[in-house]
Amino acid sequence: MVDRTAHKRETFVCNSCLNTFSSQRVLDSHIPNCLLHEPQQVVYPDPDDCKLKFSDHNKQHPLNFYLVSDFESFLTPVDDVLGPDAKTHIVDEHEVSGFCCYRVSSLPQYQTPPTVYSGLDVMSLFTSTSCRKARL
């Protein structure tokens, strides 16, 4: 499991600024200076004010066709050998295990059933088979 920090001992959190410290003594010396400032506070926006709204419906262009695709994958551990100065560490990698591709059309003669595949060589099969079936 990847931890939040490399520090393996107990951490002490300032309730005002939410910083963590390695010992109670360091936290106690931090608090008098920290209390000179306003405490950390999370303020969420009003849900009605932060909704994305589209109003220029006259600028829309209808689509006769579009493809809907979905991929399934699972995480596999990675044996990532990094140097001592590496800033990142890859833990897991997505391995694609299947897909579904479906052509949506307002024209009934061009509608096709969904193409579903699960197995080996998913990406090359997706680009060669699924999209070819979905093309006009």
Image: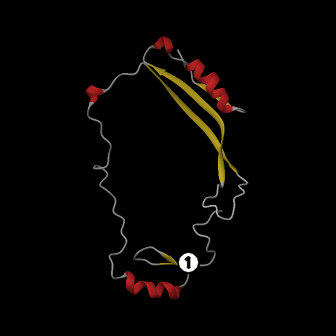
The answer to whether residue 31 is left or right of residue 118 is: left
- 112 or 120, which lies in front? 120
The answer to whether residue 54 is left or right of residue 107 is: left
**Image point (30%, 40%), residue name:** 53
Residue wearing tag 1: 11
For residue 66, above or below residue 110: below
Location of residue 17 (image quadrant): bottom left
- 29 or 67, which lies in front? 29
Label total for image: 1
Question: Which quadrant of the rendered structure holds the N terminus?
Answer: bottom right
- Please name the colour scheme applied to the rendered image: secondary structure
Q: In the structure shown, which secondary structural element does the residue marked by tag 1 occupy?
A: loop
Near mark 1 (Cα within 10 A), the count class, few <14, some 14-19 or many ≥20, is: some
- Residue 85, percent across and down? 64, 64
- Residue 115, percent across and down? 60, 24
**Image point (55%, 84%), residue name:** 23
- What residue type is disc 1 on? Thr
* Residue closest to the far top: 109
Location of residue 95 (image quadrant): top right
- Residue 72, percent across and down? 61, 38
For residue 45, above or below residue 13: above
- 110 or 26, which lies in front? 26
**Image point (52%, 86%), residue name:** 24
The answer to whether residue 127 is left or right of residue 15 is: right
- Residue 89, percent across and down? 64, 58
